[in-house]
Amino acid sequence: MPPKAGFSRAKNVGYDDDDMYDDYSEEEYVGDGEGEGMSEEDKEQMVAGMVKVREALGSEYNKVKEVDIQDALWNYYYDVGKSVTFLKNKYAPKAPAPVKPKEVSRFDQAAGAADAKAPTSTGKHMLSCGTESRARTVSNLAMSGDGESIASLCEALRDELGAMSRKSPFTERTTRSQAPSCASDYTSARTKDFFWDVPWGNVPCSRLATITAQPAPYKGGLLGGSSKLAALAARRKQKQQEETAAKADVTTNGLTADKAVALLDRLHIRENPASAPIRDDTKPRYPKKRSDTPPPPEPATVDDEPIPEPQGIRIEFPNLRAKQPSMFGAILCGSPEEPRNPHIESALSNFPLPYANAKTFTDADPFSKPSPDDLVRQAQARSAGTTKAKTKTRGGTDGEKLAESVEKLVVETKVRSKNLNVVDEYRKCGLKRVANFVVIGHVDHGKSTLMGRLLYDLKVVDERSVDKLRQEAETIGKSSFALAWLMDQTPEERGRGVTVDIATVPFETEQTSFTILDAPGHRDFIPNMIAGVSQADFAVLVVDAQENSFQSGLKGQTKEHALIVRSMGIQRLIVAVNKMDTVSWSKERFDKARQATTAFFETASFSLKNITFIPCAGLSGDNVTKLVTDENAEWYSGPTFLEALEASEPKPRALERPLRLTINDVFRGSGQNPLSISGQIEAGTLQIGDVVLTLPSRETATVKAIELPDGSPADWAVAGQIPTLHLVDIDAVHLRLGDLLCAPTDPVRLVKSFTCKMLAFEHVMPQFVDVFRGKQQATGLITALASILNKNTGEVTRRKPRIVRPGEVARVRIELEGSAGLPLEVGGRIVLRDGGRTVGAGLLESYT
Ligand SMILES: Nc1nc2c(ncn2[C@@H]2O[C@H](COP(=O)(O)OP(=O)(O)OP(=O)(O)O)[C@@H](O)[C@H]2O)c(=O)[nH]1
C-alpha cells in the first residue's frame, strides 16, 4: 500500500528481524568472562591438555603460569607438543650473552676524532639513507616475524647508529626512544616502536626538509649484498687487497690514521654548506618540462679516483631523490614549483595538508572562466541572433573554441516575428467565443464523471475509447469510474479514484470554444484547485443530491471551493445537483439542496442572478446534453447542463493590456520544439517571435511557435485562450508551474510587502499564512489588522481590530518572508491558507 504522505515513509520504514540482530544466535554468543565461549568439549580437552603439558614441561618449568598453558593450548588447538615447545622457548632460562669486546676499527677512531672536530651544524643532519633504510628493513622484518634476520639486522644497525651519531640529535633520539637492540626486543616490542623513526610520525618541523641522501661508505650486506654493485665492490676490494699484500711496507689494513683523517676531512668539505652547491629555493626544485630535465643520474659506479678507504673501497650512492615527483605524488602534493597560495600559507605551517599545493586547491578564482553551460548558452544566443548571453567571458581561448564548436552544432533557432497587429487580427478573423470554466465541489460528488459524460455525449471522445476504459475499470473493480477516467488520466488518480491535479480538456459547441478545468475535490489538493480557478471565467459547482453527501459537502469543500471562486473574482456559477438518479429525481430533494446552497451563497456575497441550478445525473447522462427522460423528472422543464454552459458569458478580455500569462504546465517536446509551456493568457496578446520575461526567475525566452488548445498551429494568441507556447533561448530550470510570463517592456513587480482587502473564511489574527497566487506560493506574516470594512460599501466600520471573524472583510498588511517575492499587481487576487485550511482570500490594494 502506498504511504499516505511522502514524509511518513521515513517513519514507516519496516525492519526485518535480520536487521535488528547480528548473525550469531543467542546460544552462540557468550560474554567475555573466563571460560566463557568454550563448549563442554573444549573444557574437557583443556583440562586433559594442561595435565599433559605440565608433565612434559617437568619441574624445570614450574614457574610457567596456568593461564599461559591454557593460552598455548587454545592457540595450538590442544596440540600438546606444539604448546610445550612454545612454552619452553618462552620460559627457557636465558644465559647471559657473552659480552663480545667491540673491536673499534681505526677508521671508527678516526671518524670519532673528525666528528669531534667538525662544526655541529655539519653533523646535525647527517643520516645516511643506508642507515635509514636498514632501520626500515628491521621494522618490516619485525612485522613479518623473521627473528633471525632481525637479529642480524639489528646488530648491524646498532653498530652503524653508534658509529655515526655520537653527538648528533639522532643519538639523543635513539637514547630517548630506547631503540630496540636485539631480536627478542623487537619481537616483543609494540608496533609503535618500529615506527619511531618514520618521517611522518611527529617529526619536528626543523627536520622535515633537511634529511638528504648523502653518499655513505658502502659496507655491503644490508643494501643488496647480492647486487651487481656488491659484486663489483667485492672484486675491487679483492684487487686492492692483492695490491696491498704485495707491498711489504704497508700493513694488511693498509691505511694510517692520518690518511683516514684526511678522508674524513674530504667528507666534511663535501658536507660544508659553504663549499657545497647551494640550493636556490627561489628556483623550482623540479624541472618544469621534461626537456629541461637534466640527464638521469649515472648508474652507481665505483669512484674512479683511487681513494684509499679504511675498510676497502668507497662507492658513491646514486642520488635516490627523484628529479620529478611521480604522477601520484604530484596529485597528492602538487608540484613544488607552483606558487603557494598566500591565504593558506599560514595554515600550512600549522597543518601541513598533503594536497595543499595542488593547482585546484590553490586556484584563487575557480569561476574565472565561463562554465560549460554559459558557453552553450552563448553559442545558442549567437545562432539565434539575440543578445541574450549575459555571462561575460573572462579570457579563455579554449572556451571560445568550445563555444564556436557548440555553435556549429546548435540547431538554427532564429525566430522571425511577423509583427502582426494581433488585436486587429483577432477582430477580423471572427473566432468563436472562448470560455474556460472550472469544475469544483466536494470529493466524490461526481465532477469528473459529469465532465466525462459531457465529452462522451458531444463525441469529443469516441465510443471505442470509452469501452476500453470501461473494461480497464472493471478489471480493478471500479467500473463506475470509467467516465471519470476520461479526465483522471494518471495511474495514481485512477488507482485511488480521486482527482489530484487540474485536468484541462477543450471542446467546442456551435458558438463557443470551451476549456474544462476539472479541479480536485479533496481538501489535500486545494492549491491545485486554486490554480484552476485562477484561469476560469466561471465555475461549475457539483453537489451530490443525496442528503448525507450533500450535508458533508456543505461542511467541507462545497463551501470552501465556493468561497475561493468568489474571492478570486468569479461571479457566474452553475450548480449541478448531481446523482439525481440516486434520489429518483425527487423534486423535494432538489429543492432542499437548492435552498441550502442559496442561503450559503447569500452570506458569501454571491449575486443570485448569476447562479443557475441544474438537476442532472452524470453517470446516466440525464439532463447533461439532452433532456431527462425519467418519468419522475417531469417536474423539470429548465435547461440542460450544456445549455447552461452556453448561456454563461466569459469575463471581459483585457486585450489591450500588457501580456500576462500564468504557466499551468511545462513539458519537453520533440527535437524541433524541445521546451513548451501552456497556460491561460490573462491579459494582452502574443505572437511568434515575441520575447517574454519569466517571473520570478527574471529570464527571457523567445516564442518559437504557438498551438491552440485543439492542437492547431497559430501565429498569435489573445487573452482568454490557453495556448501551448514552444519556447527557445531559455533553460527549463527557469520555468516552473505558476510562474508568470509577461512583456519585458512592462514587467510585473516582485512584491514582498502589501496591503489587501481580505474576506475571512476563518478567524484571522496577526499570524503566519501561506500566500497563493495561482500555483505560486510564499510564506507570509499578517503583520497588522488595519480595519474592518463594510462588505457592500467598503467603508471602514472598525479600526485596528484584534481579530477578524469569519465572513468579515478586513484591510490587512502582509509581509512575505524569505522569498524573492510574488509577482503581484494592484487588483490581483490571492488566497491565504494556514495549516491546510483556507483562512481568507484577498484583493491587492497597494504594495511597497
Ligand atoms: N449513481 C450515480 N453515481 C455517480 C454519478 N456521478 C458520479 N457518480 C459516482 O460517484 C463516484 C465519484 O465520481 P467522480 O466523478 O470520481 O467524483 P469527483 O467529484 O470527480 O471526485 P474527485 O474528482 O476525486 O473529487 C463514482 O463512483 C461515480 O460513478 C451519478 O450521476 N449517479
Image (tube, rainbow, N blue to C red):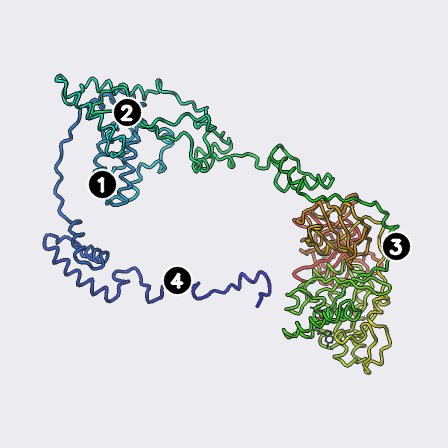
Task: Identify the mark at residue 22; answer none if there is no mark.
Answer: 4
Nearer to us of marks 1 and 4 is 1
- Vertical order, 8 against 688 (above or below): below
- Vertical order, 151 against 78 (above or below): above
Left or right, residue 352 beside residue 119: right
Left or right, residue 201 beside residue 117: right
Mark 1 and mark 4 lie on one chain; the one further toward the N terminus is 4
* Front residue of this view, candidates 68 and 837: 68
The residue carrying mark 4 has its beta carbon less than 8 Å from ligand 1: no
Q: Position of residue 526 (x, y in %)?
A: 70, 62
Mark 3 and mark 1 lie on one chain; the one further toward the N terminus is 1
The quadrant in which the N terminus is found is: bottom right
**SS at circle 1:** helix
Q: Residue 136 falls in which quadrant of the image?
A: top left
Q: Position of residue 754 (x, y in %)?
A: 74, 50
Q: Which residue is mark 3?
A: 429
Q: Which residue is mark 2?
A: 302
Identify the residue at image location x=35%, y=26%: 298
Task: Specify the amino acid type for callout 4.
Answer: Asp
